[in-house]
Amino acid sequence: MKFGGASIADGKKIKWVAELVNRYREHEIIVVTSALKDVTDSLLYRADVVADSGKIESVHELIEYLRNLHRTAAKIAISDEMVLGSVLNELDNQLHGLELALAGICHLGELTTRSRDYISSYGELLAAPILSGAMRSIGMPSVQFTGAEAGIITNSKYGEAKPLEDVHDRIRQKLLPLIGRCVPVVTGFVGEDESGIVTTLGRGGSDFSASLIGAAVHADEIWFWKEVSGIMTADPKIVPDARNIPIISYAEVMELSYFGAKVLHPRAIEPAIRDNIPVRVLNTFDPDFAGTLVVGGQEQGKEVVKSVTVIENTALINVSGAGMVGTIGVAARVFGVLAKAGVNITMISQGSSEANISIVVEESHLNSAVDAIKSEFKNGMIRELTRDSDVSSIAVVGCGMAGTPGVAARVFTAMGDANVNVIMISQGSSEHNISFVVRRADAEGAVRALHSEFGLGD
Ligand code: ASP
Ligand code: MG
């Protein structure tokens, strides 16, 4: 079971989470925790401030803020005095370590990627003792572990470290002897390299930690407790009658998350997919609701379309010129320079005339994308480079579309009926999604029209 920051935002919620885990105490459980809500952000933000300003007061301010936040949470979450005492002690120890590190950064005025990992790991390091203590306080045997203590050893790519090949064995060695005897509470997001330097698995990485551990111990299921009711047919802010999707495939979840449904990051469930372990997305604050079950295979349900998503802030770049026709390597150069410029491409389309390539990027990357392409093609092969930042991308997702004729016709007829102009279209040959670009002002209407066309609502 993995709990996200919003699920353990304060003492009351942590207490609730401990009681929730207790409901399942007849099962063998491992808990993975993330940091208290917003703590990772504050740590990273303040570390920058400290390094830039060199003001030691900002170190003290941050430490006192975190001390207060976590002590208050512990006092509310833990009623057993003995347990509370030891947890408060542990918090003080951790905060002392953090303070020393920040003071060093303050004096040096330098924040390396290695120190960023060290600093940001404290969110989880401070959360785990409180959650584990809250469980002990209601009579569940529990022990807290850092990622490394639980066997998560990584390479040294700070900020996005990858687990070593033998990580499953390491995790099994550390955790299997304990399962069933106590509930280990493991810090998500955090690992260590082979020389014992703290690493992190990338922002949002505690989902990944949970999948990794679940896969290593061959869990029956991996449960992600979030503050949403599973995965939805559409964003309920856009479509009021959007509903929960009870069962969905790994492939569909991956498609959805590429298109802005931020519930599960594809990378996060990759270890679960590889070992075919079912994943559940549950709501911490509505635990009796079945949530969404994510499984392998495509035999989940008869609906052709599962969900409709939109990425509001996208931009479209169109590269055209007769010089491109039949010339080999143009696309490679375009994508190459965009990659070098750190631009994330979300959709691509090229007609068979080869006279133009359309590329969709995140809006924030538009300027660097255009500059990069311009400087790569100074020789006239590209005649025109147009940009349009007033667009949104829409994706209709469902594995049942593969091999089912007529889905595209329904999608685009619905757009025509809703008077929405379609600017660009792309469908991968996996046929798991149809995506297209519309004017931003049309995006929400388009999502509603598609949601109702495919009968996804209540
Ligand atoms: N606390 C980390 C973050 O905010 C990891 C996580 O929450 O999954 O990125
Ligand atoms: Mg978080």
Image: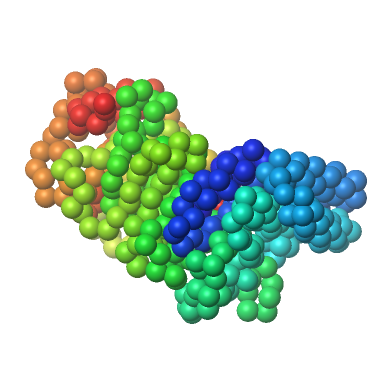
Query: What residue sits 27% from the left and 58% below the top?
Result: 296
Q: Where is residue 311 in the image (x, y as percent from the top left)?
A: 41, 37
Q: In the rendered view, would you say 438 is above or below 396?
A: above
Query: What residue sits 55% from the left and 45% below the top?
Result: 19
Left/right placement of residue 340 relative to residue 14 reads: left
Left/right placement of residue 408 relative to residue 190 reads: left
Q: Nearer the viewer, residue 124 or 378?
A: 124
Q: Position of residue 292 (x, y in %)?
A: 35, 44
Q: Which of 56 and 183 is in front in this view?
A: 183
Q: In which quarter of the image is residue 76?
A: top right
Left/right placement of residue 410 relative to residue 129 reads: left
Query: What residue sits 62% from the left and 70% below the top?
Result: 148
Q: In which quarter of the image is the C terminus?
A: top left
Left/right placement of residue 442 relative to residue 10 reads: left
Q: Which of 132 and 191 is in front in this view?
A: 132
Q: Quadrant of residue 221?
A: bottom left
